[in-house]
Amino acid sequence: MYNGNPNITICDHPLVQHKITMLRNKETGTNEFRTIVEEIAMLIGYEALRDLELEQVEVETPVQKAMCPVLAGKKQAIVPILRAGLGMTGGMLKLLPTAKIGHIGLYRDEETLQPHEYYCKLPPAIEERKIFVVDPMLATGGSAVSAIEFIKQRGGKDIAFLCVLAAPVGLEKLAQAHPDIKIYVGCLDQGLNEKAYIVPGLGDAGDRIFGTK
Ligand code: PRP
Ligand code: URA
């Protein structure tokens, strides 16, 4: 819960906080960074999947038959915002191995800070799926707001957004633009610097995941 909004979850789990500190450290190299982003995605994903529906099936244990819960067959989609969202996709897929994957290509213009779309491909029957949009960074919020608009324009309805770090301004912008979605944040940071980087942040997530600069 953030600012009384039940759709926003800020993860306060010590493991998430510990791993985010490792990401923040500028000495953390690409390989380790990538592994930790994936682990954090699993931990945040665990929280985001809390309300998955269950159904009862009969199972024969070594002792007796019993009706036991299994995940109901609702279809899912994981949608990374390229590029950095790809870093969280493997972690989410470990939790939801049968999910389909969509991609939204957006980059933030360094001058105007406006998001530009260059790719969008979503799985079929997107309107029937529970959709998990992933991107490690929610800074001004422009990229996340646009990505979710694209998904809604293509029929998506049941949408959650997962990020590792958020700035308060971006979180509020996303929650206002899309009050119907659930938002899961690893850590809420202090704010943005003059280049709209999250502070204290972890730098450029895409560059650190892919080893580019
Ligand atoms: C980063 C990040 C988000 C966006 C957040 O991507 O992964 O998509 O910036 O900023 P915003 O909230 O102000 O829109 P970037 O545009 O750097 O592209 P990349 O993932 O290809 O590096
Ligand atoms: N995108 C990033 O990768 N890092 C930030 O701090 C802000 C946007």
Image (cartoon, rainbow, N blue to C red):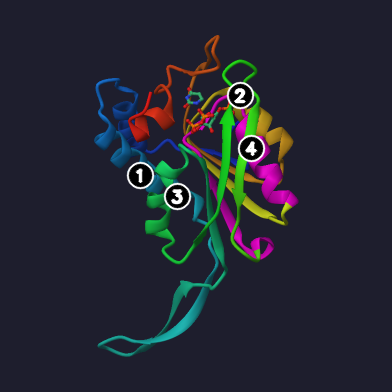
Q: Which residues are magenta?
A: 126-153
Q: Quadrant of the C terminus?
A: top left
Q: CA distance from mark 2 to mark 3?
A: 23 Å
Q: Name which of mark 4 and mark 3 comes first in the sequence.
A: 3
Report the residue marked by disc 1.
Answer: 38
Q: Secondary structure at mark 3?
A: helix
Mark 4 sits on what residue?
117
Residue for point 71% across, 41% down = 179
Label 2: element kind: loop
Which residue appears at 51% of the width and 40% of the height? Answer: 82
User: Circle 4 sits in a helix, a strand or a loop, which is it?
Assistant: strand
> Is residue 139 highlighted in magenta?
yes
Measure how far apart labels 4 and 3 are at the Cα level: 25 Å
Discs 2/4, front: 4
Disc marking residue 147: none
Q: Residue furthest front?
A: 118
Q: Residue type at mark 4?
A: Glu
Asked if residue 30 lies left or right of residue 142, the reply is left
The answer to whether marks 2 and 3 mark residues whose Cβ atoms lie closer than 8 Å is no
Q: Quadrant of residue 156?
A: bottom right
First in residue order: circle 2 vs circle 1? 1
Q: Find the distance from the CA under tag 2 to the CA under tag 4.
A: 16 Å
* Whether residue 81 is visible: yes
Question: Alpha carbon of mark 1 to alpha carbon of mark 4: how far?
Answer: 24 Å
Q: Residues within 10 Å of mark 3 (few under 14, many from 20)?
A: many
Instruction: Look at the image and tell me in which quarter the N terminus lies.
Output: top right
In this view, the residue in front, 42 or 33, is 33
Residue under label 2 = 140
Image point (60%, 30%), residue name: 171
Residue 95 image point, x, y percent: 40, 58
